[in-house]
Amino acid sequence: MLTNFINSYKVFAGKRYKYFFLLYALFFLASGPLEKAVPLVIAYHGLSEATYGIFLSIVSFTFIFAPTIIAYLSIKKFGAYALGTLGSLIGFLGAIMLRLDLLPAWLVFVFCYMILLSRVIFNYSIGNKINTVIESGNRSKYFALRDFFLFGAISVGLLAGGFLTTRFSILKLYFIFSSLFVLTCLVIFIMRTKSILSDQITENNNATHSDKTMSDDVKKNGSDELTLSAVLKKRVFWAFVLINVFTSIYNISVRFLPLLGLQLGFDVSRLLTLVGFTTIVNAILGLVLGYFFDMRSRKLIYLIDIFIDLIPALTFAFTGSTVFFVIAYLITGLKDVFAPISFSYFFDCFPESNAQFVLGLLSSIDGINATLVPILVGFLWLQSHRLVFIVGAAGIVCAFLVALLVLPNVKMETA
């Protein structure tokens, strides 16, 4: 079985995929630790927590619109290469300017915002373009392997960043890591000269069978017309909107779990250290699941991905035990092992010509949820934390039913 497992990923040994994985590793090696260090930079300059909270609110508000705009510009105006390079350059400029000391407060926030914006531009331009040119039959395994490089790079960056920060200042960290954005631009330039993102390039002879992965429902709903009105007419699009709204209640409430841990008398810092290892565990297990389930119904995995959150949600609502709290917390973190297949299923539900734009539009709607739902969760938490997770559990059930009844059955067919 091990030989079959290794052979199933050999398709990704081609030159095209090597560029993809190198690009993700370089970009997130820089972006990951620099984003995590933003609060440290703000604290270094003596800015208050309240000011930082206002900054985060502004960021959330602007990111409501950014994904849709970036996806549209990438597809219709400037292209994925140009916007991917722009995102990397913005990250480079933000990082190099944060190296300067004695900056006025407004410039600190501008340059920190540039660091955060660079990732959004990267993801919704060249990142999503890569997603659409991957052969559908290999997409789940690709996402699993991509996440292995992505999260592995973030982990390495965080370790290196911690080492550098203890020996130098936090500003020195930004100066050193800024060079990685330049390398990212170089990789994008090479990809452009070699036409790596051309839809006609294939790594194996089975690529011509990728259209078989679309169900009849998707093909009937599919359209090459990329307009907002055309997308809004799709029932599948609104199904994903409802699913994201329903699941956002629990997803936002997870951010409040440290408060629940404190109420239960648990050492949250120890828990967060333990959960930090789930990142690399998810990446490794994702490779295994990508092998076993890439040729089966992705909708089934997507449904499991939604439903499994019901277990920790109900546990958090009714338990007073620190043991069950830890178990539920770990389930919440390890559940992301299904993310590569779920993400692949999303791309199966839309024509490739529209998927990139639809994902940007959904992310913009998610931005509205990220702005409004925390207010609801905070209000409910004042009444009772049990009420928060009961409502979250109800949302999970509703999301599961919408996915079960509305989303298409997209099954892989053997070539």
Image (cartoon, helix red, strand yellow):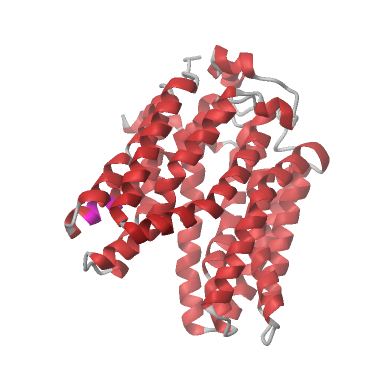
- The quadrant in which residue 363 appears is top right
- For the point 45% across and 33% down, the residue is 341
* Residue 200 in view of the camera: no
* Residue 400 in view of the camera: yes
| Residue 207 point in image, percent of width and height | 60, 22
- The quadrant in which residue 199 appears is top right
168 or 12, which is in the foreground? Answer: 168
- For the point 59% across and 61% down, the residue is 31
361 vs 340, left or right, is right
| Residue 414 point in image, percent of width and height | 47, 15
User: Is residue 327 shown in magenta?
Assistant: yes
191 or 270, which is in the foreground? Answer: 270
- For the point 57% across and 85% down, the residue is 46
| Residue 410 point in image, percent of width and height | 49, 20
With respect to residue 280, does 17 lie above or below? above
- For the point 50% across and 39% down, the residue is 244
- The magenta segment is 325-329
With respect to residue 127, does 375 lie above or below? below
With respect to residue 347, does 256 lie above or below? below
